[in-house]
Amino acid sequence: MALSIARLLLRSCKIFTHSSLLLLLSLGWVQPPRAQTVMTQQEAIFLNPVLANKSDLASPDFFTGPQSCTQFFSGIAKANVDVLPRGAPERRRLLLAALACQGVQGSRVTEDNVQALGGLACDLPGHFVANSAAVVLPRLAACPGPLDQDQQEAARAALQGGETPYGPPSRWSVSTLDALQNLLAVLDHSIICTIPKGITDAWLHRTSQEPSGQWPELTTILVRLKRSTVEKFCPPGRKPQEVEEELFFYENWELEACMDGALLAAQMDRVNAIPFTYQQLHIFKRKLDEAYPQGYPESLVLSLGYFFNLMSPEDIQKWNVTSLNTLKALLKVSKRPNMDTKVVTLITRYLQGSGQLDKDTLDVLDGFYPTYLCALSPEQMGSVPVSLLWAVRPQDLDSCSSKQLNVLYPKACLAFQNVSRPEYFRKIEPFLGGTSLKDLQVLSRQNVNMSLTTFKKLPVKTVERLTVAEVQNLLGPHMADLKAEERNSPVKEWIFQQWQEDLDRLGLGLRGGIPNGYMILDFNSRREAFSGGTPLFASGLVLALTLVLLVAGTLN
């Protein structure tokens, strides 16, 4: 790995270029003599014993040990990489090698990756910005110098979409504009006009008093922000009468000033037919939102088509969806993994509007992961066919209530009844939040080795009634994990119902059980037991009379 990275860095080069030497100097690996102000490349290399006799850095001896590339690039991250010009071949090779060293594949990076890259993160191409905006944008904001065109377009689209650490522009504050720093230069009119006017005015008033050197391209930004406050009127003759291809050539500010939301709603089919840009489509959405602040009418929702992809779950929550045709039309354009939240919200709105989960509806939902199950009422779940449960993933049930799982669990038992024992437990496991005491006792005799994660999702009232031996058989090798959860539900409640001496036999150090020598009065289960004795059962009336007699004896 290290050898391949070294070769990637220098390929067939035998000596450093001048820029590479400057980078080494900034790293502190090469120290120039105090009395000497000029040195040759070869002299500089031989000043450091690490680099001595290494005329070819692609040599296997240059990187030694399994962590060599990580150590190498941790030094690069601390260096001033700007001694290498932006776009220089050496700098590009360093970025590629650093990404390879961290095992980055594709166009997604984590916050740790960005931190490890140091100044090289400023060179991440636009596709990294688009796919990892949450971690890349804050780093680009602090980068010196302008972003390249690819980075600017990706950053602009991400900021306009609102799914960044800064949130949607309509919710920005003065501190948000301060935090944007270098990203201020990518803001266009379509973004600026959505920032609350009071915010831009306050920011302009303050920053206009500051030295322009504190902000990159501050003059240009101020002009753009000021112009956005006056570009509110549609120029004569530019008011569109229909949605046509000529709108593609409008400036964004013209669309903001001239486009009418009612026209868009009436000709949504034309909006989907013309290849408008991402920025233009967002302008159209804002116009529709202004025209229908309480939510789109169902006639418009039905005709959205691929425009639906711009909607957020919050937008969909405002809709009244009662027609199966509307549901069918939108699901047709929603077969994408990142649409799950929107699909669940859409199906929820439909079920709330129609209240029906009949065969026609289930046929429409066929082909989608049943992420919508927890959106159904317990009554609606009664109509869910058992065959649907084969497609359920554990995460599809995360938001289901105990009442919903009580309905789904018997259906799951029926659906998976003919599979082998190991496969049966794997399939039934996500539904165990609705299980019964009897079924758990059966599982405890089958060596299922239940994980503590699953155990914590079991019904508390059911877990409380399990014996120590039954829980031990259920969890198997995971029994030791109980100690870490002894203060959390349902482990806490289970411990309270066990004899402490039984818990002590586990050797886990569990505390909180029933101490020896105590009398237990449980009016719910009608149980009275004494330590070391046989449990005695009596009615609540008998126990009450016993207490009265004890009090009377004390008074006498």
Image (cartoon, helix red, strand yellow):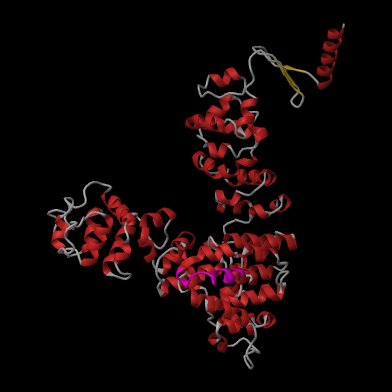
- Residue at (64, 26) in percent of width and height: 496
Q: Give the vertical position of 426 relative to 545 (above or below).
A: below
x and y percentages locating residue 520 in the rendered image? 71, 19
Q: Nearer the viewer, residue 261 or 86?
A: 86
- Residue at (64, 38) in percent of width and height: 435
Which residue reaches farthest bottom? 237
Q: Nearer the viewer, residue 198 or 547?
A: 198
Residue 308 sits in which quadrant? Answer: bottom right
Which residue reaches farthest front? 35
Q: Give the vertical position of 148 relative to 314 (above or below).
A: below
**Does residue 81 show up?**
yes
Which residue reaches farthest top? 556
Quadrant the C terminus occupies: top right
Q: Which residues are magenta?
A: 202-213
The magenta stretch spans residue 204? yes
Q: Left of 319 or right of it: where is 365?
A: left
Q: Nearer the viewer, residue 385 or 262?
A: 262
x and y percentages locating residue 56 in the rendered image? 15, 59
**Does residue 14 show up?**
no
x and y percentages locating residue 269 in the rendered image? 62, 81
The magenta stretch spans residue 46? no
x and y percentages locating residue 22 in the rendered image? 25, 63
Q: Give the vertical position of 429 relative to 385 (above or below).
A: above
Principal SS element in the magenta part?
helix
Residue 198 sits in which quadrant? Answer: bottom right
